[in-house]
Amino acid sequence: MRDVQYDSTAEQDYECPRCGDLVTAQSHPGTCADCGITFRNRGTPLE
């Protein structure tokens, strides 16, 4: 198994865990405008 190379300059996908709103950004977008919940990086495992 190989680790994915991390590129801090690449855009990442973020998702609101409550409403499912999706955002693509280079840095963490903060909180969802609709729910006020902190976005979650979709590349992070849920384990």
Image: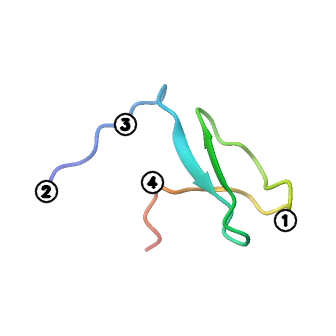
Q: Quadrant of the C terminus?
A: bottom left
First reached walking from the N terminus: tag 2 or tag 4: 2
Q: Amino acid at mark 2?
A: Met
SS assignment at label 4: loop
Does residue 10 sit above or below 14 in this rendering?
above
First reached walking from the N terminus: tag 3 or tag 1: 3
The crowding category of the residue bearing disc 3, from other C-alpha atoms within 10 Å (few below 14, some 14 to 19, many at least 20), is few
Write the residue at 46% across / 58% down.
44
Q: Which residue is mark 3?
A: 6
First reached walking from the N terminus: tag 2 or tag 1: 2
Q: CA distance from mark 4 to mark 3?
A: 11 Å
Q: Amino acid at mark 1?
A: Cys
Write the residue at 54% across / 48% down.
13
The quarter of the picture where residue 32 lies is: bottom right
Residue 13 located left or right of residue 37: left
Give the percent coordinates (x, y) of residue 21: 69, 60
Give the percent coordinates (x, y) of residue 2: 17, 50
Name the mark on residue 1.
2
